Amino acid sequence: MPELAYLNGEFMAIEEAMVPVEDRGLQFGDSLYEVVRLYGGEPFRLGPHLDRMRRGAEVIGMDLAAAGDLDEIMQELALRSNLDTAFLYLQVTRGVCPRNHLIPEDLDPTVIATARKLEAIPEEKYSRGSVAFTRPDLRWARRDVKATTLLPNIMSRSEAIKRGGYDAVHYEEDGTITEGSVSNFFCVIDGVIRTHPANERILSGISRATVLECAEDLDIPYRESPFSIDELMEDATEAFFSDTYSEVMPVTHVDGEGIGDGAPGPIAQRLRAAFRDVVRRETGSA
C-alpha cells in the first residue's frame, strides 16, 4: 500500500496529490494544520487536535465548516492506509484565488491530508537523553494558532540539529523561555514541573496537555508559569520536551551545559511511562 493522500474529496497516492499555484496556503501560508499519531492503527486524541484547529480557524476567520467532516476524513485515511504506527497530517487552506493580500470571501477551502509510516525513536535515545540549544523566538505573536507559516521554526530547529541537538528552546527578549520549535518545553525546579502558560505565546500541544494530566495522576506538582534561561540553567534539576513524535523526551544538556546531573531525571521518566499507559488505554496499542 503506497503512502496515502486525501485531497478535496479523493484518496490517492501522495505522489499524485497536487494543489494549484494560486492556493493561498502556498502563496501566503494562509492555512492551518494538525499532526496526529497512529498507535496500532488508531488515531491518538484526534478530537482535541480537531478542536484546536477549529479554535485557530475562528481566530483567522476561516470557514472550517466548509471543509467537510474532518473527523470522518481522518478516520477513513487511517483505515485506508492500513498503517500501524504513522503520522496523519491534516492541512486546510483558505482556498484558491488570484494572489491578493485582502482575504476574499466565499472561497472553497482546500483540504489536504496524508498518512506516512513512522519509525519509532529508539529506546536508548530516551535512556541517554537529548541535547537542546537556545534560540531567540522570532515567530509571530499568535503562536497559539497552528498555522503553516513555519519558517522561523524551521530555521531554529535546523540549526539545533546541525549542532547535534534534538530541538531548539525559544526565548523572548527578556529571557523568558516559551517552547521548542516543534515541541513544548518543561523543567523541574524544587520538585515542581514548570512550563509556560497556555496563552498566545505558545502552541499548547495535545502532548503537553497529556503530560499535565499524567502529572496530576502521579501527584507531581506543576505550575504553568513563565521561567527564564537563568532559572533553567541555575535552578532546574530536570528538563524535557513533549511532542507528538517523542511523547516525553528528556533533555540533559542545554547550550553545552548539563541540566541537573546531566542525565534523564526521574520525573521525566515517570511521565513518559504514564504517557504510554494513556496511549495503551485509549488506543489499545502496546
Image (cartoon, grey):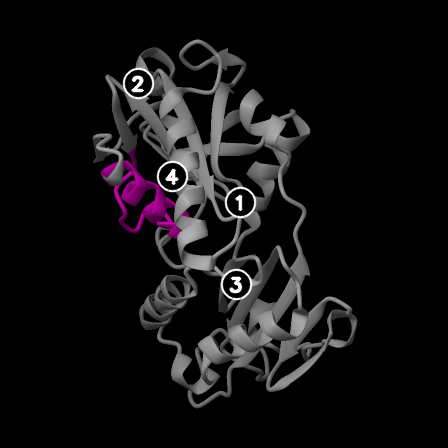
Mark earlier in primary sequence (4, 1): 1
Q: Is residue 137 visible?
A: no
Residue at 72% over, 76% down:
17
Residue at 45% over, 75% down:
71
Q: Residues within 10 Å of mark 4 (few under 14, many from 20)?
A: many
Q: Which residue is denoted by mark 4 in the rendering? A: 274
Label 3: which secondary element? strand
Q: Amino acid at mark 4?
A: Ala
Q: Residues within 10 Å of mark 1 (few under 14, many from 20)?
A: many
Q: Amino acid at mark 1?
A: Asn
Q: For the residues carrying marks 2 and 1, which lies nearer the camera in this image? A: 2
- Residue found farthest to the top: 261
Label 2: which secondary element? helix
User: Percent position (x, y) of residue 96?
Assistant: 58, 83
**Extent of the magenta region:** 195-216
Q: Quadrant of residue 218?
A: top left
How far is the residue under mark 3 from the one under mark 1? 28 Å
Mark earlier in primary sequence (2, 4): 2
Mark earlier in primary sequence (4, 3): 3
Vertical position of residue 205 compared to residue 158: above or below: below
